[in-house]
Image (cartoon, rainbow, N blue to C red):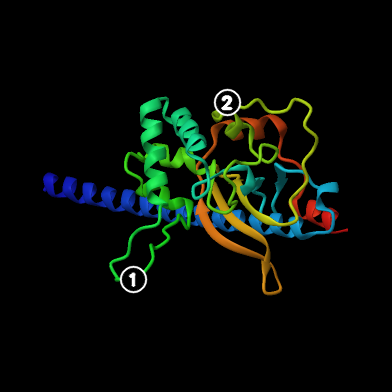
Amino acid sequence: MIWTLGLITLLGMAVIVGARYRTKTSSNYASVAAAEMAAESAVNLAIATALAPTPEQTVSFPLRCRLPGGEHATIMVEEETGKIDLNAASPATLTRFFTALTGDQSRGTRIASRIIEFRKPKAQSTPGAGPAEVRFTTVMQLDQIDGMSPLLFRTALRHVTVRSGRPELDMEAASPATLRLLNVAPKQAAGKRGLPTGGSITIRADISASDGTRFIREALVSLEGGNGRPFVIREWRRGDIDSSGARQERAQGTGPACLRVRDTAAS
């Protein structure tokens, strides 16, 4: 009898614990979904700001603000011309970049050579047909390169593009992190750089909710999308947490309400 009661008690405790776990899991899923929607809203806010008249005079990025749901947003805008184009970058630039990322000259050279080989025109099997042009259509294809570890792939993503078409990146548009990897010193007295009015940009929205949920959404956006469209969103990506960015956000605060910033830019 005692064993039976003990077994029933254990089963009851298991049911209670399981129910609590399922409730917590459902709550976590809901928190992540809410943070994801907030991140996409922040991306749309940045697009609207970029399309507003003379946005560079009223809003500067990184932008730190509060969304209507109470989430804290850090929104960054990165110009694709300031990144290394996988289809157009010179072998020297690719080698220097991947050598810096890997800390190994021979490995960096091998990866650069494989990228050059990947983008070379390939011979077609059809008689009389010219070589087929094979190019990177997205930076996510970088993981197809032999020797590209998952960690190296994720680290390289913030610094590469397929949208600039430049053999050398625009040093004025490059991030300080990219310049450091290329061993280029940023200009000490560089003036404030406004938002571009054309070309492609990556918008990175880093969302922190009050319950501690964190979600980062990145969007590759082409301004002046053509066919009468003011812009085109070419890719959505989920970003990785940048610990240095988190420290900077805590140090500088969360800023004003995001919609107030948007109204200021539009006025």
Q: Residue at image x 77%, y 55%? A: 259
Q: Nearer the viewer, mark 1 or mark 2?
A: 1
Q: Mark 1 or mark 2: which comes first in sequence? A: 1
Along the line of sight, which residue is nearer the eye, 54 or 110?
110
Instruction: Indicate which disc residue 183 carries.
Output: 2
Task: Residue type at mark 1: give it.
Answer: Gly
Q: Residue at x 65, y 25 (%)?
A: 185
Residue 58 visible (yes or no) = no
Residue 242 visible here: yes
- Residue type, label 2: Asn
Lateral position of residue 49 relative to residue 93, left or right:
right
The CA distance from mark 1 to mark 2 is: 46 Å
Identify the residue at image location x=53%, y=48%. Answer: 88
Quadrant in which the C terminus appears: bottom right
**Which element type, helix, strand or loop, lies under badge 1?**
loop
| Image side of residue 152 versus residue 250, left or right | left
